[in-house]
Image: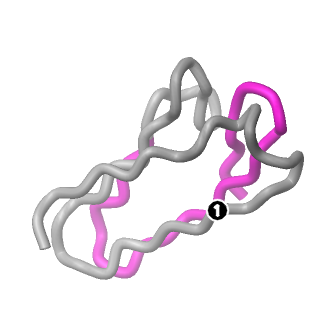
């Protein structure tokens, strides 16, 4: 319960293609944040504001995460 922020690991410390899946199981907002200067589909953060909404992220192994 309550608003939550989850920070993805550094893309450079992840294998290319490593997947992370995040799901909002509550009724509050979950913010997915970047690590360092990484990007998430070109953004600094993504918000999951709907209950049961989920997103999957794949590391490029360098400096970012792509939403799939």
27 in the magenta segment:
no
In the rendered image, which residue does mark 1 sit on? 20
Question: Seen in the image, is 2 located left or right of residue 40?
Answer: left
List the single residue furthest toward the top. Answer: 37
**Image quarter of residue 2:** bottom left
Give the residue at the far left of this rendering.
Answer: 2
Task: Tell me, yes or no, whether the highlighted magenta stretch contains residue 53.
Answer: yes
Residue at image position (63%, 36%) is 10
Relative placement, left or right, of 67 versus 27 is: right
Residue 22: % across, % down: 50, 67
**Residue 65 location in percent, x, y?**
68, 41
Q: Name the residue at 17% across, 66% down.
A: 28
Q: In front: 12, or 32?
A: 12
Is 38 above or below relative to 1? above
Q: Residue at x 83, y 37 (%)?
A: 61
Residue 36, compared with residue 47, is above or below; it is: above
Q: Indicate the quadrant containing the N terminus: top left, top right, bottom left or bottom right.
A: bottom left
Measured from the top left, where is residue 8 in percent x and y?
Answer: 53, 46
Please provide the residue range marked out in magenta.
46-68
């Amino acid at each position: 319960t309550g608003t939550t922020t989850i920070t993805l690991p550094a893309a450079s410390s992840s294998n290319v293609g490593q997947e992370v899946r995040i799901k909002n199981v509550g009724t509050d907002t979950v913010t997915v944040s970047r690590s360092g200067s990484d990007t998430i589909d070109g953004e600094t953060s993504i918000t999951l504001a709907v209950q049961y909404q989920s997103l999957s992220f794949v590391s490029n192994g360098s400096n970012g995460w792509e939403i799939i």
